Amino acid sequence: MTGTGHRVVVGVDETDDSLVALDAAAVEAALRRCPLHVVHADPFATAASTAASTAAGPSPDEPGRWVDRAVKQALAAHPELTVTGEVARGFAQPVLVQASGDAELVVIGGCGLRAPARALVETVAGGLALRASCPVLVTVGRGTANGSIAVGVDGSPPSRAAIGFAFAEADLRGRRLAVVHAWSRPGPRNPGGVLPIDFGAMSVRAGAERMVAESLAGWCEKHPDVRVRTLVVHGHPREALTELGKAESLLVVGTRGRTVPPVRELGSVSRHLLYRAPCPVVVVPRHWTEP
């Protein structure tokens, strides 16, 4: 299922980290020229407090004040935006999954947290990314302001959806796009000390390069202004993308690799990046299509 709305949704709470997510969400909304909707999930919210957050004037309760603060911050940075807010009754993950149904993008924070808090964010982010109707951006790390956008590819349907989002995002931001595939296989034994020619590895690499070229078919023509470089590297995708992310502004991945549906959890690469990436990460659902 793909989000059908034309807005960006951001989840906020009392932490400064959620304001980092807010800034990222406001930028994304401004790029898309669409409204920004600020959501705070509260399982104990009353109907009165939920309504108060959308009304004119300051909200009387604490969650409502967090939403009010976020709305004002977004408008101060981007006065051209239409910004709305609400305190939604429920826990963060189901509230944001529901909000994703009419959104182009959902954004949540995850940067600079201590281990227990990061574990909680990973749980919420992982479930949200797997179940959301639209891509989910998690501000795991700060990234490099002028870096490229990088997308991990492996030839799977989730990977193809990630490529489409990455091209669209690079086009919106006016950034270069790095298309990355990492592969690994055991090296040959070499008891004599002479480096042999590993024809198996050469064949694997050639196949990987063909797969990347096939994955890009049509996207360069659809986004001719996006400058693309391809990287086929030897190593585990988790480590390769984490290292690459140190110089990038955004990493884009699919929900999972070549796993046969039904998929009940994120793949190991996506989970790893949601917890340890040095820059923001977008997880793109399998059936995402460009608006």
Image (cartoon, helix red, strand yellow):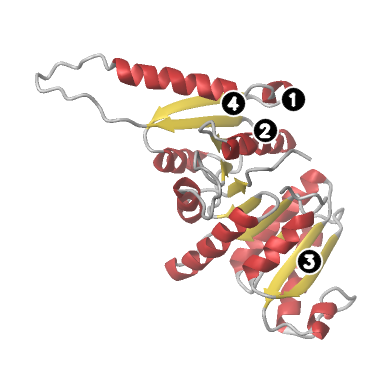
Above or below 170: residue 78: below
Q: Answer whether residue 148 is visible to the viewer in this image.
A: no
Mark 4 nearby-residue class (10 Å; few <14, some 14–19, many ≥20): many
Above or below 224: residue 84: below
Above or below 110: residue 181: above
Q: Nearer the viewer, mark 3 or mark 2?
A: 2
Q: Position of residue 213 (x, y in %)?
A: 56, 20
Mark 2 nearby-residue class (10 Å; few <14, some 14–19, many ≥20): many
What is the distance, in whole Å, between disc 1 and disc 4 at their CAs? 13 Å
Q: Give the labeled residue for mark 3.
A: 71
What is the distance, in whole Å, between disc 1 and disc 2 at their CAs? 9 Å
Residue kind at label 4, given as amino acid type: Ser
Farthest residue to the right: give it: 56
Task: Judge left or right: residue 84 versus residue 275.
Answer: right
Tag 2 or tag 4, which sits nearer the N-term? 2
Q: Give the labeled residue for mark 4.
A: 215
Q: Position of residue 163 (x, y in %)?
A: 62, 34
What is the distance, in whole Å, between disc 4 and disc 3 at their CAs? 40 Å
What is the distance, in whole Å, between disc 3 and disc 1 at their CAs? 35 Å
Q: Answer whether residue 229 is visible to the viewer in this image.
A: yes
Q: Nearer the viewer, mark 4 or mark 3?
A: 4
Tag 2 or tag 3, which sits nearer the N-term? 3
* Tag 2 secondary structure: helix
Residue drawn at point x = 51 percent, y = 52 percent: 266
Tag 2 or tag 1, which sits nearer the N-term? 2
The residue lying toward the viewer, choosing from 22 and 205, is 205
Q: Quadrant of the C terminus?
A: top right
Residue drawn at point x = 87 percent, y = 53 percent: 80
Q: Give the labeled residue for mark 2.
A: 167
